[in-house]
Image (tube, coloured by chain):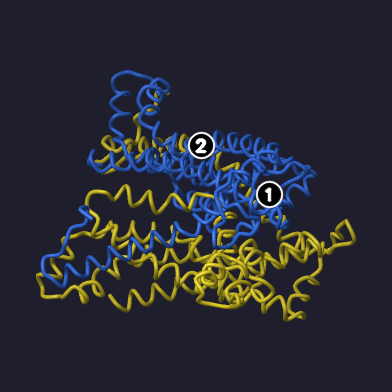
Chain colours: A blue, B yellow
Amino acid sequence: MSTIAMGRGAPGKRWVNGLAVYAVLYLVFIYVPVLFLPLFSFNDSIYVAFPLKGFTLAWYGKMANSPGLIAALSNSVRVGATVAVISTIFGTLAAKAVTRYRLPGRGATVGFIMLPLVIPGIIMGIALLLLANFVGVKLSLFTIGLGHMLVTVPFAMLVMISRLEGFDKNLEEASLDLGENGWTTFWRVTFPLAIPGLIASLLLTFTISFDEFILAFFLAGTDVTLPIYIWSQLRFPAKLPSVLALGACILAASFVLVTFAEWFRRRGVQVKTTSGV
Amino acid sequence: MSERVVGSGAYDKKAPTGLRARIRALALRSEAFRGFSLLSPTLGFMILVLAIPVAILVAFSFWTQVYLDFDKTFTLSNYIAYFQKPIYNKLLWKSIRISGSVTIATVVLAYPMAYFIAFKVKKQKLVWLILITVPFWTSYLLRVFAWKIILGYNGVINSGLGSLGLIKEPLQFLLYNPAAVVITLAHAWAAFAILPIYVSLEKIDRSLLEAATDLGDGPAIRFLRVTLPLSMPGVIAASLLVFIPTVGDYVTPKLVGGTTGIMIGNVIQSMFGKANNWPMGAALSVISMLVITLLVTAFLWFTKRVRKGVA
């Protein structure tokens, strides 16, 4: 624990150590439950129970041969990629508007866009289902995508706001004063500086959409996404181990994507503190 | 794009009189106009997928279901049904109690962790923050499902204790009850509580803490009088971010709640499924939203008063 600064006196030191122990236990609490999924996906038994029987990759083979899985996977990737690109564009435009211009009613507008973060998912799902029904749009991957963007646009905007606030506004103004027009300034100054934020936003919004179940459940037509496919498989105990294998794969993929995204995003925040803004 | 620099600060700091004031007003207006035109796609989209659907939801709650169609004459019958059948009201308040317990558990468990990262970790804050955040972005469904595996009749705990010889019969009280729902949700929403608390702790001016120490406060008193009050905005934000979304959850109660752990979200969901009564489901959603909003307003008012009282 070399990263932890120790207190001066002995009681302080003990207290800090106690806090460090707590922090490690907390990480265990966060991580261990989820790790049971991959653990039992390699277990050579149809029952998800101790003692472990032996190592097998059979469930992964079974999973790969499940009908419907590949279709659901490709649906999820298509929805996720589309949602990521569109919500990052929306989020970036909005973030630029609120960080670069003085807007009357700024707080209320931002508050409105952030509302989905504090509305129960089920209510948003139902409201969109009713909209689709009212307008006469058939439920499909398109309606799932719309539902996901309701959640991903605020996240994309948050990520982009923290990135755009993080670099010096004067860089853009300098470019304009040196005679570049708004468009070249955007491409030669704003865009390169915003890239880490854009990548973080794309990765995060893709992952949110890829893993989202609560809204998608109400908005799905005949084509389903991966979480809905998993939900439908949970009813069959015999399929449990291959669902665990699928879950382990999804967790691993989400984990890698999100770690990258967070790394990019937080690195952006660090730039902010060093540039003294 | 010739009006680029107007209103950017340096040009209009002097007292706004006469022509200058008018130019300034014009600049502000054009700045606001440009800002809003940049904002308009996002704002328009959010109105389309948030404001309009919620308006339709409210409208639906005053209609009635006729087999597969809807009778669109205005009626309060869904709201009357809510008060006539005590089960709805009971479930809503049970959901609020469960989410309240989840919120308290999550915030209390998260606070020391956030405190640790903000004050005790010096160099590797980034690593800790990423470690905390990453599991939160991964599949909600799978994180909830993991607890079903852990707490189940033949699950991890029961089979583990059994194979160690500590228990003969599997413990039945682990799964399918409100406590299982609380544990599962407290785990699933952990990161949502840590981050806002961390941010508010990180913002605290360290010289205030030094001042408190210099004036003779011990660590405990200093925490209670300086650190805790200053971190309250984060605690409040964390509470709302956990409480509001969990009230309507239907996945967790369905997977680990059993019959006694059912929440209002399950009933609303069934109205759009087996029960097939969309307007009643809409009315239940509207009532839930109203009650949640009232509770949150009361909570904010109360915390504001307490903070004023302390200061």
Q: Is residue A214 above or below residue B26?
A: below
Is B280 in front, or is B90?
B90
Is B65 in front, or is B301?
B65
The residue pinned by badge 2 equals A88
Q: Is residue B156 left or right of residue A124?
A: left
x then y, percent, for residue A162: 38, 43
Q: Is residue B44 above or below residue B113?
A: above
Q: Quadrant of the C terminus of chain A?
A: top left
Residue at mark 1: chain: A
Q: Quadrant of the N terminus of chain A?
A: bottom left
- Earlier along the polypeptide chain: callout 2 or callout 1? 2
Say which element carries label 1.
helix
Is B264 in front, or is B285?
B264
Q: Is residue A245 above or below residue B281?
A: above
x then y, percent, for residue B15: 26, 43
Say which element carries label 2.
helix
Q: Is residue A158 above or below residue A187?
A: below
Q: Is residue A250 visible?
A: yes
Q: Is residue B46 visible?
A: no
Of all residues, the one furthest to the top in this rendering is A179
The reply to whether the C-beta atoms of the residues labelled 2 and 1 are less than 8 Å apart is no
Checking the image for residue A228, the label placed there is: 1
How packed is label 2: few (under 14 Cα within 10 Å), some, or many (20 or more)? many
Instruction: Identify the residue at image location x=67%, y=43%.
Output: A62
Residue at mark 2: chain: A
Say what amino acid the circle numbered 2 marks. Answer: Thr
x then y, percent, for residue A232: 72, 52
Q: Is residue A229 left or right of residue B146?
A: right
- Measure how far apart labels 2 and 1 are at the Cα level: 25 Å
